[in-house]
Image (tube, rainbow, N blue to C red):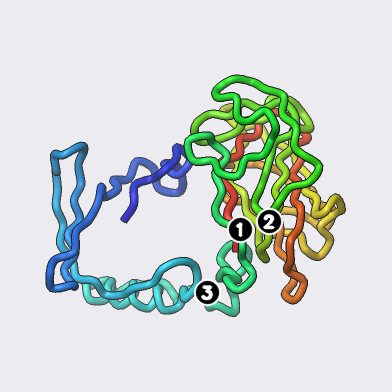
Amino acid sequence: MFAPEAEYERHGDVQDVVFPCGYTVAPDGDTINLYYGAADSSIALAHGSIRGHHFGEGDYPESERIIRELLTEAGVTDLPPTGISVGDAKGVQVAADDNNMLSPETYIGYARAEHFSSPSGVVPDQPNDYTTPDKLEINQWGLIGKWTVDDEKGTVNSPHGSIVFRFQARDLHLVLGPGPSGKPVRFRVRLDGADPGESHGTDTDASGAGIVTGQRLYQLIRQPQGNIHRHTFTIEFLDAGAQAYAFTFG
């Protein structure tokens, strides 16, 4: 029940969908009212009953069960087979490891960026040569090379531009896109200055190599259980044009 927060969230498998602007919950604690429109003028209103509560990642089988139950009640009879189970989940679908996750969602664009530590600070909306301190504290991050940072993303303007992030979490993801041209962009990731090895994500190999081919969430690091502590992550783009939007962790 949220409108997209960034331009990249407006594109995907379903284009030009209508998002609810907001909602209210009636005094009975069950009835939810969704309203659609712009500014203070509603153009549509829908009512429903709250049938389940869950916040954050995980518990996918229960969420699926509720959705399938609602579809059946609505008369749908040709439902596909039950989807993945927790044990079958892979990549970004795996539930977050909350016990070891100390790093928050972090935006690259200056409108919502936090803990940005490049000495120059952000130079909005124009190319700038960035550097990053040799030592970063937990959840600090910075840019290296020539980047243009706007309100929601950073665009690398020349080959070998990098992002460095000091984090603690099992998984590290980054929303990336190849830029308006759509040309694929090669990249390589490092963990504490070395190849990620067995800690590579589903979108990289053991050497840390990967390619940005479309605008989506890329899993770059997936650490084995029992070896989760603070690390310095680096992604270097071997080609110009990549756009970086936000880090998420799991």
Q: Give the amino acid at mark 1.
A: Ser
Given residues 156 and 122, the one toward you in this image is: 122
Query: Helix, strand or loop at disc 3?
Result: loop
Residue drawn 74% across the image and 53% down it: 204
Percent of width and height locating residue 33: 17, 59
- Relative placement, left or right, of 232 versus 12 is right
Q: Give the mark, 2 or 1, whose residue is nearer the N terminus.
A: 1
Question: Is mark 2 in CB contact (under 8 Å) with mark 1?
Answer: yes
Residue drawn 16% across the image and 39% down it: 40
The residue under label 2 is 167
Residue furthest right in the image: 194
Percent of width and height locating residue 13: 45, 49
Q: Is residue 192 above or below residue 51?
A: above
Quadrant of the rendering where the N terminus is positioned: bottom left
Q: Of the residues tagged 2 and 3, which is closer to the observer?
A: 2
Mark 1 Cα within 10 Å, few/some/many (few <14, many 20+)?
A: some
The residue under label 1 is 103
Percent of width and height locating residue 139: 64, 52
Mark 3 vs mark 1, CA separation in Å: 27 Å
Q: Give the amino acid at mark 2.
A: Phe
Residue drawn 24% across the image and 71% down it: 50
Quadrant of the rendering where the C terminus is positioned: bottom right
The residue under label 3 is 84
